[in-house]
Image: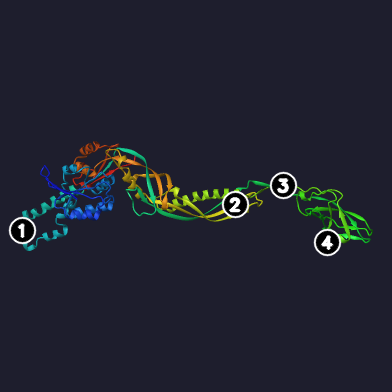
Amino acid sequence: MANIFGKDPRGQSTAQVIYLELDEDIISIKDRLDWVKAQRVILVIPKGNKALTNPIHMKLLLRKARDLALEVALVTRDALVRRLAREVGIPVFGSVARAKRSKPSKVSASKAQPLLSRVPGVPRATSLVIPREREGIPVWALMLIIIPFVVMVIIGSVLFIPSAQVKLSPLRETLNETITITVDPNIRKIDYAEASVPARKVRIEITGRGNIPTTAKKDVPDAKATGTVVFINKTNQEVIIPMGTVVGTSTGVNIRFTTVDTATLPPAFQSRVEVGIVAVDPGPMGNVGAYLINKVEGALALQVQVLNPNPTSGGTVKQVNVVTKADKDRLKSIVLQKLYQQAYQAFLEKIPKDSLLIPQTINVIPTGESYDHFVDEVADELSLELKAVALGLTVNRDDLRALATYLMQDKVPEGYEMVEEKLSFEVVEAQKGEEGRYTVNLRVMGPVLASIDVNSIRDRIRGLPLEKAQEKLRALPLRKEPEVAISPDWFNRMPWLPFRINIRLEAEE
């Protein structure tokens, strides 16, 4: 800590310079102000100190300075701190020398009270009513009271009634840079030294469905073989052979057939009758050669024997689609990809608008799957219902803006300032690291505007005729003609009081 007291060469009031430490916060800064003995104090903020990067902290500093009747100025090159300071009306400079050379504000913010507040109000005027018994008070005495009141009202009207709206469009360039940051769900605040930003885990449950045509084919039995057999009577009695009597081969694989009609053997030994048959099972296995069918099933075998003088024929196969494991794997991959897109859209609808989703962090974890067919089952189409849990990471856009502003200070052209609230982001790439962290390449885009000191401009144009004020505004680094609107319209001069002049910097094209 160092305090430097010096006498202004022009005889102005002394200024106390306080060099802040890197780790100081707003509380310690306010404590420092309690010990200031000079009327003016210059706070030198080191690079990396974040005590005044919060607009609330900046307002607390201003309030503390007002309470102590101090004129405070800042020395910093941090674009964010400079912007916040100017927004609340705290002068900011690039060096201590410039801060010391600057002219102190003629009217301290803490003393900028309406002049009318010092004039007796209407209720107090009732005390001026002259009792009847004192009607002898001279007229000139009344005038001494009324005239100052009227003068103060006129002065107050001139000072407080006029207002001006000034719109400035500073020179504008577009910043387009890629930075590398770490998205970390394990931290709670920005780590500027490590370029790390806190991340929040998000989770949703989703269900997806899909279907694909099966591609594998195989032969399956189709038509049944047919033919005829001859039954031979082994008795001297009539034998009835009912329809559906089962006959078959007796060697190798038993191929079975059934009769298609009812037949009757005459009552004579070795009598014969021919009957049509059809294979029990479809396919070419029912196509058997002549004299291979020689077996009768059931009790009828004691009365008759059977043979086929001619081969059977007509048993065929056909090609059909069947389910394979490859079909299941392919369908699951397709549905998972759909679930990823579904999760991405669901997260965008669910997360707050001030959050940015890192798409590469989305992980879809299946929790249940249901296919409508098994492997090798005949099917032209395979369907799947897949249930899953989707996980992802989001980051706060304000945190990204703060970190990006810090990391890209050297990228801003000389004489320009970054417009932090206009920054936009695009995730280029993200690589997973340890403990859930991701290294993210982030494209940052946004305007940078020519630096314009709003407080200084107010001081330079206050009280000037409109034409003269516009002439001074045109001398600024602007891309458009300055716009000035004075109220009331007939008042062709800028207000005298700076706080009655509202200056807005326009970042849009």
**Circle 2 residue:** 383
Q: Amino acid at mark 1?
A: Ile
**Circle 4 residue:** 298
Marks 3 and 2, Cα distance to the nearest angstrom?
Answer: 24 Å
Residue at image location 88% in from the left, 58% down from the top: 304
**Circle 1 residue:** 137
Left or right of residue 306: residue 216: left
Q: Depth check: 438 or 143 in front?
A: 438
Q: Amino acid at mark 4?
A: Gly
Confirm or deny contact between disc 2 and disc 4 (CB under 8 A).
no
Marks 3 and 4, Cα distance to the nearest angstrom?
Answer: 33 Å
Q: Nearer the viewer, mark 2 or mark 4?
A: 4
Secondary structure found at label 3:
strand
Q: Residues within 10 Å of mark 3 (few under 14, many from 20)?
A: few
Of the two numbered discs 4 and 1 on the same chain, state the one appearing first in sequence: 1
Of the two numbered discs 2 and 4 on the same chain, state the one appearing first in sequence: 4
Marks 2 and 1, Cα distance to the nearest angstrom?
Answer: 107 Å
Q: Amino acid at mark 3?
A: Lys
